[in-house]
Amino acid sequence: MDNFVFNLPTKIIFGKGEFEKLADEAKAIGKKALIVTGKRFAKESGLLEKTEFLLTSRNVQFVEFSEIEPNPESKTIDKGGEIARIANADLVIALGGGSVIDAAKAIAAIAVTGKPIWDYCNRPPKEKLPAIVLPVLAIATVAATGSEADSASVVTNSETRDKRGIFSPALFPKVSIVDPLLTLSIPIKQTIDGVVDMFTHLLESYLSSKAEAPVSDRIAEGLMKETIKQGEIVLNDLSNVEAREALSWISTLALSGIPNAGRRGPHPMHRLEHPISGIYGIAHGRGLAGIMPAFLYHTEELHSGRLKMLGKALFSTDSPSKTVERIVHWLKNLDAFNSLKELGVKKDSLERFADMAIADDGGKGFINSREPLGIEVILEVYRTAYDYKNLFRKA
C-alpha cells in the first residue's frame, strides 16, 4: 500500500429529511450567507424558497446568486466572488448538484483573495489557493460528483473552454447535508449521468494505481457492484427512495478518500472528458459514458490484471475483454451507451480535445494513467469514441 494521510474535515449529515437542519448548521457557521444555486432547479423545485425561509427563521441573513451553469464557468464564478465580497458574506451555501458545489468552493476562495479564479487553474497556477477561504455549507441535490466530500473544484474557462480542476484542503466543505429525498425530483437522464460519474470515480484509481491495497480494492469493488445494482433499480423506478438513498451515499463515499486510501491513482478518463464538456457543454457524466468504452478497449492490455480481478468481483468472469463488454452492456441497459458523434461532437474537434487533455495534465505530451498515455493512444480513444460503429454491437 502507498502511505497515506486520511483527513475528511467535512461534517456530513446524511439521511432522509436532514435538509431541515440547514438553518441550525448555517447559524453555527456564519451570520450572512451567499446562497449559490443553478439557474432553474432550486427555484422551480421550491428548495430555494424553503432555504430562505429556514435561514430567516434562525436570523441568518443571505443574498442569492442563482447563475451557475452546468460545467461552471470562470466568469460566473468571478461574478459570484465579487457579490460575496460586496455583501460581506461570511458563509457560502451551495444548493444544488456538483456544478453548484464546485462553483461555491471556488467562489469561497476568490471572495477572500479578489483574484480571478483562472489564476488558480493555470498549469502551473499563476496564484496559490489561500489556506483559509469562506466556509462552505453544501446541500447536495444530485447523487453524482461527490463534491460534497472532497477538496476539489472543476472550472471551465469562459473564453478558451479549457476545463480544469483545482485542489486544496481549504476547499473541503465545512458541512455537507446529503438528503436523498432532495434527489427524487431529478429526471432520469440526469440521474443516470450521475450514476455513471460515481462509477467512474471508483473505477479510475482502481485501474490506474499499481499499489497493492486489497482493503481499498474490496471497498471499491463493493461500491461499484452496488452502483450497478442501484442504478438499474432507479432506472425502472425513479421514486425508489431506498435506491436514491444508496446512490447518494455511494456518490459521497466515492471521492471521500476512503475507497482509494493506500493506492493513489490518476483519473485519465476525466482528463479525456473535460475538453468534451468544456467545449460542447455536454453533461459530464454523459461525456464519461461516451469515453469509457473506447478507453477500456484501447487500454485493455494495460489494465488486464485489474480488469480480470474486477470481472471476478462484479461479473463472475476472469476475462478482461468480457469484463469490458459487461460494463458496456450495463451502460446500454442504462441507455447511456452513446458515441461522441451522437452527442453532437464534430470530428474536427478530436485533435483539439487531445491537446487540451494533455495541457490539463501538465503539458508534458501525455496524460497519466497506469502508464503514461501518449498522443497517438489518446487520439485513438477519441476516434473510437467518436463513432463506435459495430464495436460492442454484441455487448
Image: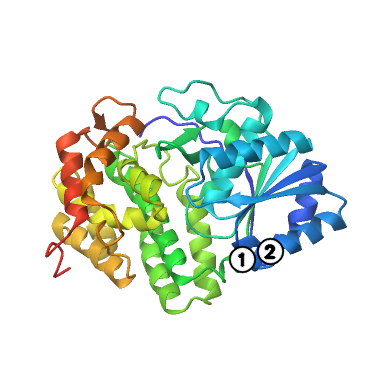
Viewer-side residue, 25 vs 183 = 183
Q: What's the amino acid at mark 2?
A: Leu
Is 229 on the left or on the right of 117, as rendered? left
Residue 361 appears left or right of 126: left
The amino acid marked with disc number 1 is Leu
Query: Considering the image in quadrants, where does the C terminus appear?
Result: bottom left
**Residue 51 is drawn in which quadrant?**
bottom right
Residue 62: x percent and y percent? Answer: 79, 48
Q: Which residue is mark 1?
A: 182
Q: Quadrant of residue 103?
A: top right
Circle 1 SS class: helix
Tag 2's secondary structure? helix
> Nearest the camera: 118 or 132?
118
- Indicate the position of residue 169 as horizontal and vertical percent values: 56, 32
Mark with earlier residue (1, 2): 2
Callout 2 environment at 10 Å: few (<14), some (14 to 19), or many (20+)?
A: some
Q: Is residue 327 visible?
A: yes
Q: Which residue is mark 2?
A: 47
Looking at the image, residue 239 sits to the left or right of residue 224; the answer is: right
Eyeballing the image, is 140 above or below 208? Answer: below
Vertical position of residue 282 compared to residue 335: above or below = above
The residue at the point 22 percent across, 46 percent down is 348
Confirm or deny contact between disc 1 and disc 2 (CB under 8 A).
yes
Label 1, residues with CA under 10 Å away: few <14, some 14-19, many ≥20? many
- Residue 24 locus on image (x, y percent): 80, 52
Judging depth in this view, the residue of 204 and 192 nearest the camera is: 192
Residue 130 on image: x %, y %: 61, 25
Name the residue: 23% across, 27% down: 365
Identify the residue at image location x=60%, y=32%.
170
User: What is the C-alpha distance between the residues marked 1 and 2?
Assistant: 9 Å
